[in-house]
Amino acid sequence: MKLSELIAAVDAENLKNISTHGADSGDPEVSGIYYRSDMVKPGGVFVALAGQRTDGHDFVEDALARGAVAVVVQQTLTVRTRIIEVNNTRRALAQMAAVFYGNPSEKMTLIGVTGTNGKTTTAFLLEHILDVAGFSTGVIGTVNYHYAGRTVKSGLTTPEAPDLQRLLAEMAEAGVSHVILEVSSHGVSLDRIAGCRFAAGVFTNLSQDHLDFHKDMDDYWAAKKRFFTDYLRGVGALAVINVDDKKGRELASVLEDLRRVPVGLSDAARIRASELRFDQAGNSGRLHLNGESFPFHSSMPGRFNLENILCSAGTAFAMGVSSEQIREGIETFVSVPGRLERVHNTLDRHVFVDFSHTPAALENVLLTLREIVDGRVICIFGCGGDRDRGKRPRMGEIAMRYADLVVVTSDNPRTEPPEKIIEDIVKGITGHQRIAPESLIRDLESGVFTVEADRRRAIRLGIRASKPGDAVLIAGKGHETYQIIGEGTVAFDDRLEAEQVLSWDMNDVADTVDY
């Protein structure tokens, strides 16, 4: 592709100036688009992004040394090369990447799912329903990127624009017809999805998260809303909205020019459920699809999963999938990795691993366990380092409110000392007794908590304290198979750690001081 074709992809409001600064004025062939200078190959175009920690403009010379034929910047530079100066390099990157990879989103049905919680479960369930309906599907999101029998390890929930467009192009080449993309607030705010054409958008809910990135909840909400107001502008674009959520109702009220499909339990919802039953076997009830209705059963437990079921069913129905196929999809769907994922055992312990890393998600899961389990609820959790500190005490308070016993531990501390993160969490736990880890024994009365910064020891401790019939929730990491400590990662999987403990003789474990 010629450089001139990439430049033409940048919208007129963004493009400021084009100069050569001593380079020849020809129109070179472009071999690739890069936002990291160390990845530049000869013939590539380097786009300088201003990040939170580093600034790509500081690496322009490195990109040129590696063979870049042009650079895209939002600062005035005088280096000897072709310079495309723009107001927003992130937006230019996305627009150029879309054109470079042949505008792949225009060759498929692209569905964006956004919201604080439930994106991944909604995406996986919707994918399964579409599979049942005979479509060739793919998913791009938090757990992984997968399509046509291939799975790629997930880096970002919503990939950087060139990675996203390349992935969409590969999916189109493989014959994928429908792609479900988890759209994060970062993906919107950082223009990663610019250049994508969406056929539908799904809104699950909104609660506190990512305030390390957004200045406040208003800014966070604005990013979520902008996905619908700025990106769902195609003919017949569809907006599926959970109107049981306060922000969902607000969103529905401002999208009068879109095909709106309100879902929820209220009479305002076109897609709703009734006659509901919740137990360890999952959710059951009757699903109403704009006049049609049928009984359903889902193996996913919890009232919060009902939101995901309604969002997925509503999207599929509005896209022409039959009620019979939707019912089959719901009833044959098993689970999502790390989302209230059961760790099976023969000890009559109900052990679950869940990704719940926000106050609302943790509350939803604990309430579900309260509803479906007769025994005590033991919660093992922590909060991520270098992330929203404001949610830490809230999560401490929620854990102690709904669980009988709480073990506060580490969860991807990154560059923060784990003890400081735990200190923030504990600030939210008031009026409850803190005990030493070795005092958390099986017959302990409820209403106490302990602290164990070592996550492996914390998991052992929490399971050791359980009795037959109890539920143990290991929260925060879910599907993740690593711990981020400092700038690096170490292998760590909550599921494997729990399985190891559950393979022991619990009578011996209960008497072991070195948990």
Image (cartoon, rainbow, N blue to C red):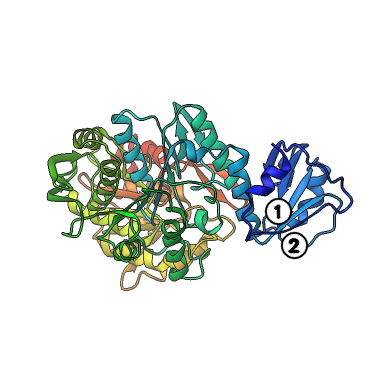
Quadrant where the image shows the N terminus = top right
Above or below: residue 53 compared with residue 149: below
Is residue 447 found left or right of 213 in the rendered image? left
Q: Which of 11 and 424 is in front in this view?
A: 11
Kindly identify which residue carries mark 1: 48
Q: What element carries label 1?
A: loop
Residue type at mark 1 is: Ala
Q: Where is residue 336 in the image (x, y as percent from the top left)?
A: 35, 40
* Label 2 secondary element: loop
Q: Are marks 2 and 1 in contact (CB under 8 Å)?
A: yes
Residue 281 showing in the rendered view: no
> Is residue 153 placed above or below 116 in the rendered structure?
above
Q: Is residue 227 above or below residue 340?
A: below
**Foreground residue among 320 and 71:** 320
Q: Nearer the viewer, residue 510 or 276?
A: 276
Rendered residue at 46%/34% (across/down)? 146
**Percent coordinates x, y for residue 433 in the rendering:** 32, 68
Looking at marks 2 and 1 on the same chain, the residue that comes earlier in the sequence is marked by 1
Q: Hey, which residue is sitting farthest right in the picture?
A: 22
Q: Give residue 75's mark.
A: 2
Residue 480 percent coordinates (x, y): 46, 43
Residue 394 visible? The answer is yes
Rate crowding at label 1 as few (under 14), some (14 to 19) or many (20 or more) other CA atoms within 10 Å.
many
- The kind of residue tagged 2 is Gln
Q: Residue at x 16, y 40 (%)?
A: 296
Counting from the top left corner in percent of width and height, residue 137 is at 40, 33
Q: Between 76 and 311, which is closer to the camera in this rendering?
A: 76
